Amino acid sequence: MNAILPTRSWRAAFLVCACAALCPNVAWGANSKVPPPPPDLTKEHNWDPGRSLKEPGFYNLGPTGMVGFIPKSGKGHQIFVAKVDEGSPAHGKIQRGDVLLGVAGE
C-alpha cells in the first residue's frame, strides 16, 4: 500500500484534525458545557438599590425616561427597571422594580 494518502483523503483528515484541535467541545462533545439559562427577573433576585446606574448592564432606554438593567446573557428578553425619571413618558405608568417582558404584546 501507498504510505501517502491520496489528496482528497489527506485534506479530509487534515480538516477533521484542525476542527478537533480548534473546537474540541464541538467536534467531539467532550466536556461540552451548556450555558446556564438567563435569570428570571420576575422571581426574587438580589437587587441592591444602592447600585450605581453606571455599572455594566444598565442601559438608558431612550426617550422613555427609564434606565433598565439587562443581565449579561442578554438572552432573557427581560429588563429590570432601575430608574424612572419624573415627568418622563414612563412616569406614573411604570415604576422602579418593574420587569419589562415585552412591548405591545410581543
Image (spheres, rainbow, N blue to C red):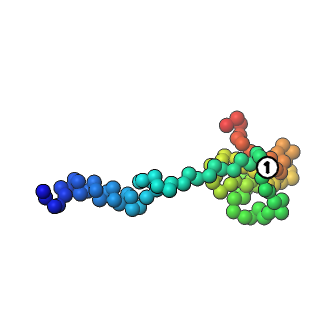
Quarter of the C terminus within the rendering:
top right
Q: On the image, which quarter does residue 9 sit in? A: bottom left
Residue at coordinates 76% horizontally, 45% vertically from top-left? 42
Badge 1 density bin: few <14, some 14–19, many ≥20, Cα 10 Å: few
Indicate the position of residue 33 as horizontal and vertical percent values. 54, 54
Considering every residue shown, the one lying at the far front of the view is 1
Considering every residue shown, the one lying at the far top of the view is 105
Q: Is residue 54 above or below residue 106?
A: below
Q: How many marks?
A: 1
Residue 99 in sight here: no
Residue at coordinates 33% horizontally, 55% vertically from top-left? 16
Q: Amino acid at mark 1?
A: Glu
Q: On the image, which quarter does residue 55 sit in? A: bottom right
Quarter of the N terminus within the rendering:
bottom left
Q: Is residue 48 left or right of residue 40?
A: right
Between 78 and 17, the residue placed more toward the observer is 17
Residue at coordinates 13% horizontally, 58% vertically from top-left? 2
Considering every residue shown, the one lying at the far left of the view is 1
Residue at coordinates 68% horizontally, 54% vertically from top-left? 71
Indicate the position of residue 46 as horizontal and vertical percent values. 79, 56
- Mark 1 residue element: loop
Residue 79 in sight here: yes
Indicate the position of residue 47 as horizontal and vertical percent values. 80, 57
Between 47 and 4, the residue placed more toward the observer is 4
Q: On the image, which quarter does residue 49 sit in? A: bottom right
Indicate the position of residue 31 as horizontal and vertical percent values. 50, 56
For label 1, the residue is: 44
